Image (spheres, helix red, strand yellow):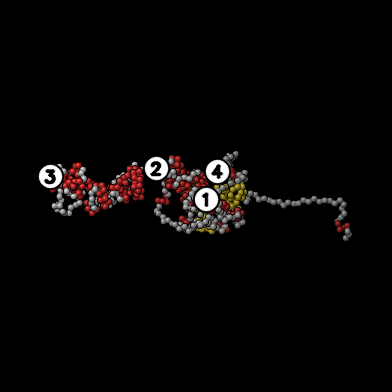
Amino acid sequence: MAAQEEFAHIRQHFVAPIQHDYEVIRPIVLFAETAAERSRQTGVERTVVGDKARRFVLEGMDGLRDRRTDARGAQAPGYPDAIVEYILYLKQLYPPIHLREIVRIVHRKFGYKTNHHTLKRFLAPYDAPHQLELALPTFATCADAYQARWTVVRMAAEGWNKRSIADCLKLSRSHVYTILEAFERDGFAGLEDQRTRPPQHPDNQLSLPFLKEVLDLQQAYPRAGRFRIHGLLEQQREKAPPSERTVGRAMAINRQFHGAPGPWQSAHDAQADVPSFKHLPYRPAYRHHLWFTDIRYLVQLEGSWVYSICIIEGYSRKIVAGMVSPHQDLTAILQILFAALAEYGCPHALVCDNGSVFTAKDYLAILRDLAIEPLHIEQGKPWQNMIEAQLKVQLRLADDHFEQAHTLEDVQHQQAAFIETFNTTPHWAHRTRADGHRTPVEVLGWLRGRIVEPQRLRELFGRTEWRRTVNHYGFVSVQRFYLYAEHGLARQRVSIWIYEGQLRIEYHQTLVARYRCLYDRKHRQLHDVNEPLFYTTPFASPQLELIELDDEQWRKFQRRPARNYTKRIAMFGHQLSLLDLGPPHSLYGP
């Protein structure tokens, strides 16, 4: 019997419309017949047959019930349980998801058609005031990179928007576009990991030897940041080091796993925020245009402060002269100024603060005679002096070493090492120079300021400075006085400075001895010397004294006796004449 005749025979026995509808869809559900074939057998429209089969799968026998006679009131939209659960899952997975996007996903996944208006009424009772973020796996946390890329492709195929995919998986939108384009172009082969890591990739450079090299510098300079550490690596390596960012990553790894010192925070950082001043009244325009100088409290030794005095060339940021002194007086300033002028010539102007040593008459007189304009910053505005920023670098690179020093000699060695490091490592101000010069030494080069004859400098600074040679007893001769300097400096040239009643004897900018004196500047005459004070220096003689003298026996200074120049009397011989002829006039008559 044909299928059409069989259905016509069975139809005669139906007592309810639901029996008719079930018999129409029964071969489709049980035997997987197509809706078009069943439509030809039963005479029912194909779309009607497909709709009845779909409602039966989703709702069971209730889906075949004729709902045209039901009362239509204000009913909530009804979705099958499977679709309801998935809609709520999508909303919890990604709360910002758009309603039209949910409609598209449901249609592609279940073949169920709805609209965003109906979906909005359905979700109204489920709206939560605040949705907690779920701890879901993201793109970066996937163990398999291929599976992570396939997740992006699968979500796009299900109907997810590219922006929603990026936000849900925590990756950039451009990355989503790249993955989808690779899949459309190459298929599943485009999901394979085809990236090649360049040799300079940070993961290739963060080797154990490099981490050890950075760790040693972190321990040697615990207050230095990644810029200074990178500069120190350039100085001590033959090849160029990795980038500054890679050095920063290495420092972070050492801090986390190898016990490196943490990021240093100055005591000033805890104070209230101070507004930044971008305007600097003194900006150098060319080399040796402006020099800057200042005095910084460095460290305390045996209860007394030791000071760092530096002069910096503003354009290149090179420290042209620097010294460590236990005194912050005019003599120390004149010493370092003399050394800088003799080595680098004269600048156009010299910027300093309003301290008493920088407003002294002798200091200003020397600058005036050399045609150097003295510039003083405003009261209470130290940021106007460019050297203040460079002293911050000293604080980071060298203060830890200064604090560990126990003698003045140690501090002087650390100061010399800091100046060498500062001048030969890259400076932040030169990082964008077109000529490729990065260090202060490279920027300044061989250029010097206005040259002054050494004799002229000696004449100007000679008002307060002499050069003497120490004799084999350790004494120097200054006018009519013998002054003890240091026995270990025999046959060495030392500098003698006189200012404000003090006479200082120094060797290579190291104070050896100090006396109180009475000096007449007008006639340049030293009248009296007393109160000697000697300092412990590395220049002391290792030879022990045969006889130890106490303070009363040891004469540290003495006046040289005046010389008595006796008048020399000329003794002439007298030749007697052979014949006594009398006076000459007697030979010629009266």
Q: Which of 52 and 527 is in front in this view?
A: 52
Q: Position of residue 115 (x, y in %)?
A: 23, 53
- Residue that mark 1 sits on: 442
Name the secondary structure under disc 4: loop
- Residue that mark 4 sits on: 538
Q: What's the residue type where badge 1 is placed? A: Glu
For the point 60% across and 54% down, the residue is 453
Q: Which of 121 and 503 is in front in this view?
A: 121
Whichever of callouts 1 and 4 sits on the residue coming sooner in the sequence is: 1
Whichever of callouts 2 and 1 sits on the residue coming sooner in the sequence is: 2
Whichever of callouts 1 and 3 sits on the residue coming sooner in the sequence is: 3
Q: How crowded is mark 2: few (under 14 residues within 10 Å), some or many (20 or more)?
A: few
Query: Can residue 425 be seen from the camera position used here?
Result: yes
Name the secondary structure under disc 3: helix
- Residue that mark 3 sits on: 9
Task: Compute the Cα span from label 1 to label 3.
Answer: 106 Å
For the point 26% across and 50% down, the residue is 104
Which quarter of the rendering shows the N terminus? top left
Whichever of callouts 3 and 2 sits on the residue coming sooner in the sequence is: 3
Whichever of callouts 4 and 3 sits on the residue coming sooner in the sequence is: 3
